[in-house]
Image: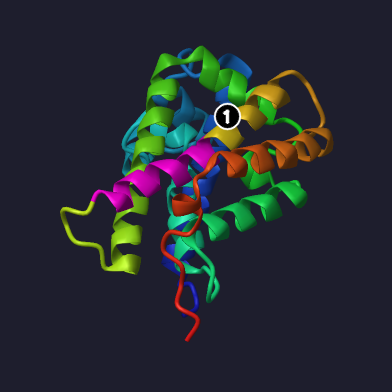
Amino acid sequence: MAEGLRERKKRQTRQHISDVATGLFLERGFDAVTIAEIAEAADVSVNTVYNYFPTKEDLFFDRSKGIVDRLPRYVRGRDKGESAAAAVLRELHREVEEVAPSIGLIDGYASFMRVVLEAQALRSRLWAIQQEVVEQLEVTLREETGAAADDPLPILMAGQLAWLQSTLMGWIGGEMVKGRKAVEVSREALVLLDGMEELLSEKALNYAVRAAE
């Protein structure tokens, strides 16, 4: 369905506020910037900012939904005969090989990570996002496998799969903060992924295989 004029204007306003806020955060740090300053710089009211972003942390992690939805999407989109873990590993390998900005492989990501490391509120929000990933993965795995409500395997597997993503992105962030180039980091990230795969048990690697019908 084509985007209407009102929806387009709302999307553009949201993106403008986010871009302005990100620029201020990168320049001065998260804690030093107020919502009032963001509103003034974006030429909107404080209420408008809050209408789009309920908290200041939401302004910084404005694309967190993509992180939360990524692994459930990979699991739902797995091929016939492919397990949940195999699908996640395949897609993470693809993103690393493509030097994808979505997992932090972009020159300039170091500045983003420094802001996170310097602000306790952002570190706490990042932890909350990681927990949300696990929760959404558990829901997806239960739906995909038809597991009983008291079956612990979906939450156990959700933790394992979320560990793959959080460890990979955490390592990439740490390397980018050192000032390294994204292409260089991506090559070593592939080795890291292979190492993590070797740590997964056969049971984990073969969980939730899609029937080859």
Residue at 59%, 52% (x, y): give it: 89
For residue 190, which quarter of the picture? top right
Q: Does residue 144 lie above or below 141 as drawn?
A: below
Viewer-side residue, 141 vs 212: 212
Q: Position of residue 130 (x, y in %)?
A: 41, 36
Q: Position of residue 121 (x, y in %)?
A: 39, 20
Answer yes or no: is residue 191 visible: yes
* Mark 1 nearby-residue class (10 Å; few <14, some 14–19, many ≥20): some
Taking 39 as reference, is 179 left or right?
A: right
Residue at 53%, 47% (x, y): give it: 15
Q: Does residue 81 lie above or below 175 as drawn?
A: below
Taking 153 as reference, is 166 left or right?
A: right
Look at label 1 and name its amino acid: Gly
Viewer-side residue, 48 vs 122: 122
Magenta range: 152-166
Q: Position of residue 59 (x, y in %)?
A: 45, 35
Specify whether residue 21 is painted magenta.
no
For residue 125, which quarter of the picture? top left
Taking 209 as reference, is 186 left or right?
A: right
Q: Secondary structure at mark 1?
A: helix
Residue underneath mark 1 = 170
Residue at the outermost front position = 202
What secondary structure predominates along the stretch shown in magenta?
Answer: helix
Answer yes or no: is residue 45 visible: no
